[in-house]
């Protein structure tokens, strides 16, 4: 077991932004623990797949335990697992609410707690969460209150944790995307979604990976909500 290379945990790593984040960290020679419900172990010995539902505290515990057992440390946690349910407010079901809170908020809470505990022992670490610029600007005709409730909570928790751990070597940041071309959005919706950005195009997965990797190497940046949203949070 070697401690010399950095180790990143990426949640929601099976597809979309998370799968690209795994590649982005591997390209920087990190060892990566990749987790999601459907993740499977591939042939790269520097990627450890740990399957599980991120809402379950047992998944959080297993991911961090396996990271330390296999790679010896946890330098970075990327909270990327998340779901999106857009509906008029009064149409949301109790199940929508529970699923959203479980995946987006409990999924952030449990693994961040486990990872920060490991980082505290090391005296260093970085937590970065993928939120959404919908928390800063509601879009008429696209009702998303459960995204606002959950991702807005993570943005606020990012600042609180950044200050709580500022003197103990742990930075805490978020990347706030606009609408990104991933399996979350069917191709037939892309033209409409592009129009929701001042730059009149959707973002690419690479835009989010680049932002996460920038924050990873920006040692004086903590408590930052980095908007990568084609100008959405600036105005319309
Ligand atoms: N795409 C966008 O336009 C956009 C915009 C703003 C913010 N975001 C945020 O960016 C993040 C990634 O989005 P994406 O577009 O890449 O999404 P995606 O393609 O739908 O992928 C979501 C990932 O989360 C995992 N996941 C979902 N529920 C889970 C659960 N209960 N437990 C464990 N893993 C779970 C999925 O894997 P399994 O199915 O294998 O579990 C998958 O790997 C999300 O947090 C999303 O809210 C995306």
Image: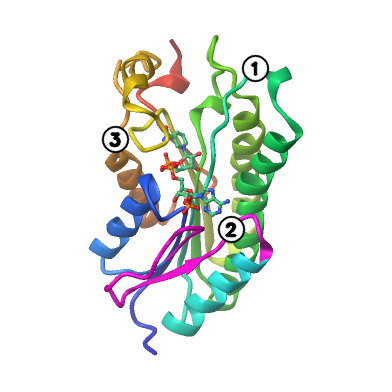
Name the one closer to the observer, 4 or 53. Answer: 53
* Magenta highlight on residue 38: yes
First of labels 1, 2 by sequence position? 2
Mark 2 close to ligand 1, CB under 8 Å = yes
* Magenta highlight on residue 14: no
Q: Position of residue 123 (x, y in %)?
A: 54, 73
Mark 1 close to ligand 1, CB under 8 Å = no
Q: Secondary structure at mark 3?
A: loop
Residue beneath the point at 39% across and 84% down: 3
Residue beneath the point at 59% across and 18% down: 143
Q: What residue is shown with label 2?
A: 53
Q: Quadrant of the N terminus?
A: bottom left
Q: What residue is shown with label 3?
A: 204
Q: Position of residue 25 (x, y in %)?
A: 31, 61
Q: Using a 10 Å C-alpha cutoff, classify the residue at mark 1 as few (fewer than 14 neighbours), some (14 to 19) or many (20 or more).
A: few
Q: Secondary structure at mark 1?
A: loop
163 sits left or right of 179 in the view:
right
Labels 1 and 3 touching (C-beta < 8 A): no
């Amino acid at each position: 077991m070697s401690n010399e290379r950095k180790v990143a945990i990426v949640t929601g790593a099976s597809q979309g932004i998370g799968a690209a984040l795994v590649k982005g960290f591997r390209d920087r020679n990190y060892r990566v623990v990749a987790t999601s419900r459907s993740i499977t172990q591939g042939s790269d010995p520097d990627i450890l797949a740990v399957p599980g539902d991120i809402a379950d505290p047992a998944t959080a515990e297993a991911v961090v335990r396996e990271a330390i057992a296999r790679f010896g440390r946890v330098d970075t946690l990327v909270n990327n697992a998340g779901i999106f349910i857009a509906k008029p407010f009064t149409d949301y079901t109790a199940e929508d609410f529970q699923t959203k809170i479980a995946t987006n908020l409990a999924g952030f809470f449990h693994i961040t707690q486990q990872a920060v505990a490991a980082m505290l022992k090391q005296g260093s670490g970085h937590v970065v969460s993928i939120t959404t610029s919908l928390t800063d600007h509601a879009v008429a005709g696209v009702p998303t209150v459960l995204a606002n409730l959950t991702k807005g909570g993570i943005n606020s928790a990012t600042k609180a944790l950044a200050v709580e751990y500022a003197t103990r070597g742990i930075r805490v940041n978020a990347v706030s995307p606009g609408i990104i071309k991933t399996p979350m959005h069917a191709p037939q919706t892309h033209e409409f979604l592009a129009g929701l950005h001042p730059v009149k195009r959707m973002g690419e997965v690479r835009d989010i990976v680049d932002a996460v990797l920038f924050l990873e190497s920006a040692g004086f940046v903590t408590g930052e909500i980095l908007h990568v949203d084609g100008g959405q949070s600036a105005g319309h």
